[in-house]
Image: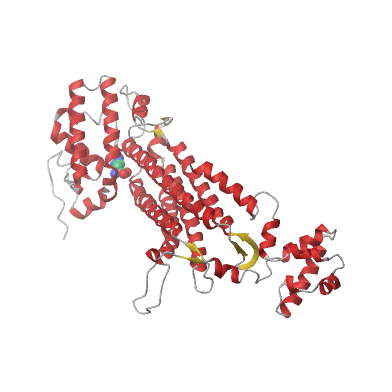
Amino acid sequence: MPKSKKKRPAGGVKSWQARLTMDADQITAAFLSSLDVDSSLWQYDIAGSLAHARMLKEVGLLTAGEFRKINKGLMSIARDMDAGTLAMPIELEDIHMVIEKTLIDRTGQAGMKLHTGRSRNDQAATDLRLWARHSIHVLSQAVRDLQRALVDVARHQGRLVMPAYTHMQRAQPILAGHALLAYVEMLDRDHCRLAGTLKRLNVCPLGSGAVAGTSLPLDRRMTAQLLGFDGITRNSIDATSDRDFLADLCYCCAMIAVHLSRWAEDWIIQSSNEFGFVELSDAYCTSSSMMPQKKNADTLELIRAKGAGAIGSLAGLLALLKGLPLAYNRDMQDDKRFVMPAVAAVHQALVVARGIVATAKFNRQRIESDINAGFLDATSMAEYLVGKGVPFRKAHQIVGRLVSAAQANGKHLAELPLPALKAACEKFESDVRRYLGAANVVRRYRPEGSAGLAQLNKQLAYWKKELE
Ligand code: ARG
């Protein structure tokens, strides 16, 4: 049962709401509180407060003695937070007020001056930017690590000829490394996206106050510099109500998760009995509680699943922000409930993905045993005729008919006798054999970015330099 609202003298437990005469009941206090999610911001909150206090001292709003006390007090709070011993009553609403209230308890008058020229609105916006900056750093590292693992497999096992699929039907032969490096490309765009998000968000809102700034002579550039920001936000209204950078970060996470899910699906299929192309390490599989023979790719399935949460976070955050009038609204407190789980889940998925990749083996025997099924060399055969002056569309028709005939006789294109080829088109000579069979086709790929060995080596050299 919620305790009924109790009357109290002005200025009860919350030093910042003297104008209110009643405290919230327990359920309402819990409802108002964001401590369950924002307590993880404590390091950024303390860093922001230290910089703010230092600037207040420099502009003469704190004495050196007061600054020393605040500094010492914040450090002691940091130690307690680290040890997990700081009391965090939900009535204090959020981490910002827990830290300020504790500081006041420990330093008295000096602590009461910390919030000079500051609002929780610019404070929370600053903490979130610092948190997002750190998150981007951690995600970027994990993306890079996964890219390196993929490049490593491409270097050591990537010269294997395998089928590429379009529409999940056998299409053309490729080197395995080429497919692995396709994922490295996706992840590189993710890495770029994170860098772009970081560049945009790295400006400091402190000094914007609640919405309009302050009449006190704050040195915003000093605070920004102390916190490692590239500059300051230009407009106090926007600065206190902008959460675009969190939406950007959610999008980064959603996109990474989408890329990971595509890769996971690929490898779930390729590690199935039917394909048997990729062998996963037992360390990343689980078995069945009933079927003793099972080796399931559950880690890949869960990586595939993470996309749901990340996409949901992006949609949820956008829905939270849509229609909010200027400037700060309490709705924004819930921003963390979307972005924090997305970052955590995507980071975890990246780390596990790296382990899966680093321990996977391509099954050369299995892939090679069936490599000429599915007429992977049909396009190459048509291109042979193009080389003999046959217009491509015509060559396409000739080969299409030959594929049909070969299929009816259970043969590969390379097994059709020359007279049969000549009957289809007199331009066929015996040198067509050099264009047929998956290995021959891969050898013939010409333009940059194709799936052959020269292009693979070029890509490997590029990534070696880029990822070092
Ligand atoms: N916990 C709040 C948040 O994260 C802090 C801002 C509250 N500001 C206010 N004016 N009530 O959004």
Based on the displayed image, in which of its 4 quarters is residue 57 positioned? top left
The total of numbered circles placed on residues is: 0
Image spot of residue 351 (x, y percent):
40, 54
> Along the line of sight, which residue is nearer the eye, 317 or 400?
400
> Along the line of sight, which residue is nearer the eye, 202 or 382?
382
Position of the N terminus, as image quadrant, is bottom left
Image spot of residue 445 (x, y percent):
69, 55
Image spot of residue 436 (x, y percent):
72, 65
User: 227 above or below 21?
Assistant: above
- Would residue 1 be seen by someone viewing this image from the given angle? yes
* Residue at image location 57% in from the left, 44% down from the top: 462
User: 52 above or below 360?
Assistant: above
> Along the line of sight, which residue is nearer the eye, 321 or 368?
368
- Would residue 323 be seen by someone viewing this image from the given angle? no
Image spot of residue 139 (x, y percent):
41, 47
Task: Describe residue 7's horizontal placement relative to residue 453 as left or right.
Answer: left
Based on the displayed image, in which of its 4 quarters is residue 169 positioned? bottom right
Based on the displayed image, in which of its 4 quarters is residue 242 positioned? top left
* Residue at image location 57% in from the left, 68% down from the top: 367
User: 387 above or below 330?
Assistant: below
- Ligand 1 shows up in the quarter that is top left
Task: Describe residue 392's horizontal placement relative to residue 138 as left or right.
Answer: right
* Residue at image location 46% in from the left, 44% down from the top: 194
Give the image's coloring scheme: secondary structure
Task: Describe residue 236's horizontal placement relative to residue 440 as left or right.
Answer: left
Q: Quick one: which residue is furthest to the right in this view?
A: 426
